[in-house]
Image (spheres, rainbow, N blue to C red):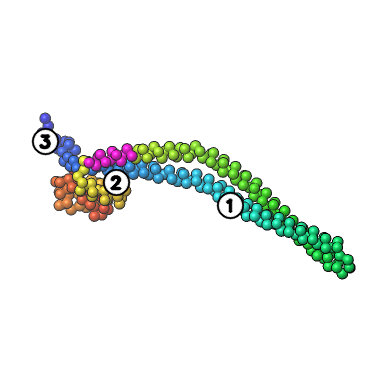
Amino acid sequence: MIHEALRATLFPALSRMVMHPDVTSLLAVQHDDLGIYALEARLASLAPRLAILEKERAKVSVALERARKATEAEEARHREARGRTETHRQLLERSQRQYESVTSPREATAALTQLEQTKRMVDESERDASHVQGRVNELRHQIADLEKQLADVEARQVEARSSLDADRVAIEREMSDARTKRERTADAVPRSMLHTYDRVRTRRRSETVFPLRAQSCSACDTAIPTQRRAAMAASGSLEMCEGCGVLLYAAE
């Protein structure tokens, strides 16, 4: 059997102090938390992919809705134009009858002027109605094209959306399992230590517990006073680094 002094000289790694079991349990919890953060990041990464699909669909959908509203407005204008045309035609018929019933040249001149004016009104209202009808027809063709575009986009996105949904379900299942495992792992950690860790972890949302490296914090190299290092080594307690705010433990 190798003498302990010789063992420490030849195999220094074997002479290191054993890590406090509470710290070992806490590091297991941290490992679980980092896994959960990775799953949350994967879940969050689905959102931009879904947003791209939604943006593509929304672009066509908004244009379609705008065309439908424009069509409704033009159809209302067309009904008004047809109403004016009908009114002017009735006036034209009345003017025609008045012109045909006059008996004097003076009355005939006035009736003819009224008749010509009414004819112009009918012509203008008919042109207006025809123009609006043309606009309505254009918009209806536009709506048909946009409806086809929207159907094409939705059909093209079916597979992508199905894949995203499957990924989401799978990640959420993994997260549920990971959180259940984390709860079991956390049962082995003293409540006060776990509370301190959770408070700092919630703020950082990344690796929170680091080992001492010689006399310093392994995260930022801030020197740790000898008395604090000794207390950490003796009791397995955690100390907060004054430099970067992580929690430190004596690794050896």
Magenta region: 176-187
Residue under the point 62% across and 47% down: 143
Q: CA distance from mark 2 to mark 1?
A: 50 Å
The residue tagged 3 is: 4
Q: CA distance from mark 2 to mark 3?
A: 36 Å
* Badge 3: residue crowd in 10 Å (few <14, some 14–19, many ≥20): few
Q: Percent from the top left, x then y, of residue 54?
A: 50, 46
Front-most of residues 214 and 203: 203
Query: In the visual, does 149 lie left or right of 23?
Result: right
The residue tagged 1 is: 66
Task: Say what secondary structure mark 2 lies in.
Answer: loop
Mark with earlier residue (2, 1): 1
The residue furthest top is 1
Query: In the visual, does 238 lie left or right of 164?
Result: left
Q: Amino acid at mark 2?
A: Glu
* Badge 1: residue crowd in 10 Å (few <14, some 14–19, many ≥20): few
Front-most of residues 252 and 163: 163
The residue tagged 2 is: 207
Q: Nearer the viewer, mark 1 or mark 3?
A: 1
Q: Percent from the top left, x then y, of residue 12?
A: 17, 38
Q: Amino acid at mark 1?
A: Arg
* Badge 2: residue crowd in 10 Å (few <14, some 14–19, many ≥20): some
Q: Percent from the top left, x then y, of residue 190?
A: 19, 45
Residue under the point 30% across and 43% down: 33
For residue 10, which quarter of the picture? Answer: top left
Task: Say what secondary structure mark 1 lies in.
Answer: helix
